[in-house]
């Protein structure tokens, strides 16, 4: 039994507008599975694809006032490409963001709703990931967090230290899932989280029980009667277990 990482879920005041922004950023298409939800994914996507990672933008009424534990890093191929991409993103509505990063080679931006993301300088490790280099999750203990997600997903651990851990699809393609050590206590609800799903034919409830045994806990965000299950990993990062697809 194993789960696959399906998408990054982003909360928004206006899912359609923010979905269009991210579609333009990534060069992907948009669709909608219902009111208040915009799906951003490659136009030629055929599921199940173990290396695919979409962006799901969901409308919520809450204002953007939280600190982030999850963000996206975008890949570039050269210094020129990085500069051009940053300029284009600002034209699309992104704004420079100061999260205390200091003098670093990457550029920190916020999308039109304030969601922070990074445009990386060219790095060899991300040369074949596609536009999203990595989804980055802050945590207090990268080793322990990586152990949980290594058991939860059918992904492969590529690197683990006290400061950083990196996983990637077992297919060896697509973006990385990374965990960075940040000592701040987790005391807020994040507007960006991960969505995972069982493979076709696998049982959602059985997977949820397996995750609980690994240390996940149930979370009530007021979601009500919905087909997905909301859990938190051992560090309190919320994620959703969707139905099999």
Image (spheres, rainbow, N blue to C red):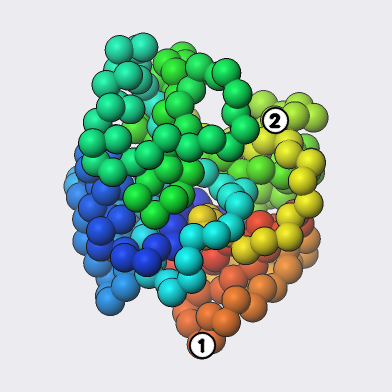
* Vertical relation: 181 (above or below) 80: below
Residue 80, image quadrant: top left
Number of callouts in the render? 2
Q: Residue at x 57, y 73 (%)?
A: 229
Secondary structure at numbered mark 1? loop
Which comes sooner in the sequence, label 2 or label 1?
A: 2
Residue 52, image quadrant: top left
**Which residue is farthest bottom?**
225
Q: Are marks 2 and 1 in contact (CB under 8 Å)?
A: no
Would residue 207 be found to the left or right of residue 4 on screen? right
Q: Residue at x 44, y 18 (%)?
A: 121
* Vertical relation: 173 (above or below) 64: above
* Vertical relation: 98 (above or below) 120: below
Front residue of this view, candidates 178 and 159: 178
**Residue under label 2:** 164
> Is residue 201 visible to us here?
no
Q: Residue at x 75, y 29 (%)?
A: 163
CA separation in Å, label 2 and label 1: 37 Å
Q: State the image coordinates of residue 203 (x, y, percent, origin top left).
A: 54, 71
Front residue of this view, candidates 136 and 5: 136
Q: State the image coordinates of residue 124 (x, y, percent, origin top left).
A: 46, 14
Image quarter hosting the N terminus: bottom right
Front residue of this view, candidates 27 and 79: 79
**Residue under label 1:** 225
Q: State the image coordinates of residue 114 (x, y, percent, origin top left).
A: 44, 50
Q: State the image coordinates of residue 129 (x, y, percent, origin top left).
A: 40, 29
> Is residue 143 visible to us here?
yes
Would residue 38 be found to the left or right of residue 74 on screen? left
Crowdedness of circle 2 by 10 Å Cα count: few (<14), some, many (20+)? some
Image quarter hosting the C terminus: bottom left
Would residue 128 be found to the left or right of residue 170 on screen? left
């Amino acid at each position: 039994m194993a789960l696959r990482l399906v998408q990054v879920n982003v909360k928004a005041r206006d899912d359609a507008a923010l979905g269009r922004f991210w579609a333009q950023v990534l060069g992907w298409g948009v669709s909608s599975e219902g009111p208040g939800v915009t799906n951003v994914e490659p136009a030629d996507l055929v599921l199940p694809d173990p290396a695919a990672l979409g962006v799901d933008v969901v409308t919520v009424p809450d204002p953007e006032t939280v600190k982030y534990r999850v963000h996206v890093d975008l890949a570039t191929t050269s210094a020129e490409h990085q500069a051009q991409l940053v300029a284009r993103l600002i034209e699309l509505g992104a704004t420079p963001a100061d999260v205390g990063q200091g003098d670093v080679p990457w550029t920190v931006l916020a999308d039109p709703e304030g969601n922070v993301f990074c445009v990386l300088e060219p790095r060899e490790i991300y040369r074949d990931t596609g536009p999203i280099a990595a989804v980055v999750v802050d945590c207090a203990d990268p080793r322990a967090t990586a152990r949980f997600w290594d058991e939860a997903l059918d992904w492969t651990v590529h690197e683990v230290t006290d400061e950083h851990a990196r996983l990637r699809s077992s297919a060896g393609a697509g973006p990385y899932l990374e965990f960075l050590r940040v000592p701040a206590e987790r005391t807020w609800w994040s507007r960006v989280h991960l969505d995972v799903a069982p493979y076709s034919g696998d049982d959602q409830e059985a997977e949820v029980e397996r995750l609980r045994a690994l240390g996940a806990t149930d979370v009530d965000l007021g979601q009500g009667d919905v087909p997905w299950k909301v859990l938190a990993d051992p560090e309190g990062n919320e994620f959703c277990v969707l139905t099999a697809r």
